[in-house]
Amino acid sequence: MAMGYASGVVWFWLPGSTALVTISASDGNVTIVQTGLPKREKYREVPLEVTREPSGDIVESFREEGEHGETDLAYYSWSPSTGVWSRFSPGRCAGGWPIGTGNAGLVYGSGPAMTKICSFSRQ
């Protein structure tokens, strides 16, 4: 499970049901949508870390488990406007975990106890 607060919205994402719940801090309006999981042929997606961008897009890292025991680390974003998962590469932050957002874009942590920080903008 992951949760956060940004741009006047409290949000949480539940990996078991793939429900994204957003709560407006100004009026208490609650929205629940099913994001599902990304699909890669012959792989099973295992959610690792998730964050939400100010745009409302969900960004996650996944362990992709192949049918022959191979694994990959993959990054996907989910757009509430399209309802579609899109794979992307975080450039120089590859190998890190998305831990939040900042003025420079997504913030990734890596290394022992997340001591290395990297930022990357998907735009």
Image (spheres, helix red, strand yellow):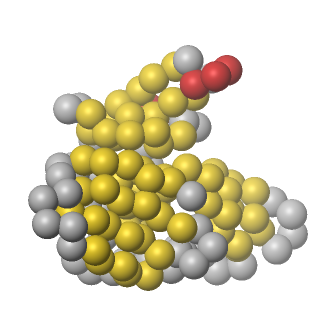
Name the quadrant containing residue 29.
bottom left
Name the spot of residue 43 as percent of width and height, x first.
70, 73
Image height of 121 relative to 75, above or below: above
Q: 90 or 98: nearer the eye? A: 98
Name the spot of residue 26 as percent of width and height, x first.
12, 59
User: Where the N terminus falls, by quadrant?
Assistant: bottom right
- Evaluate whether residue 75 shows in this view: no
- Seen from this angle, which residue lies furthest right? 68
Q: 14 or 65: nearer the eye? A: 14
- Seen from this angle, which residue lies furthest left? 26
Q: 61 or 11: nearer the eye? A: 11
In the image, taking residue 100 as reference, residue 122 lies left or right, namely left
In the image, taking residue 62 as reference, residue 26 lies left or right, namely left
- Evaluate whether residue 72 shows in this view: yes
Name the spot of residue 53 as percent of width and height, x first.
29, 51
Residue in view at x 54 percent, y 36 percent: 96
Image height of 102 relative to 64, above or below: above
Residue in view at x 28 percent, y 74 percent: 30
Image height of 34 relative to 58, above or below: below
In the image, taking residue 122 as reference, residue 47 lies left or right, namely right
Q: 117 or 14: nearer the eye? A: 14
In the image, taking residue 76 as reference, residue 31 lies left or right, namely left
Image height of 36 relative to 26, above or below: below
Name the quadrant containing residue 101.
top left
Give the number of callouts.
0
Name the spot of residue 14 as percent of width and height, x first.
54, 67
Residue in view at x 45 percent, y 34 percent: 108
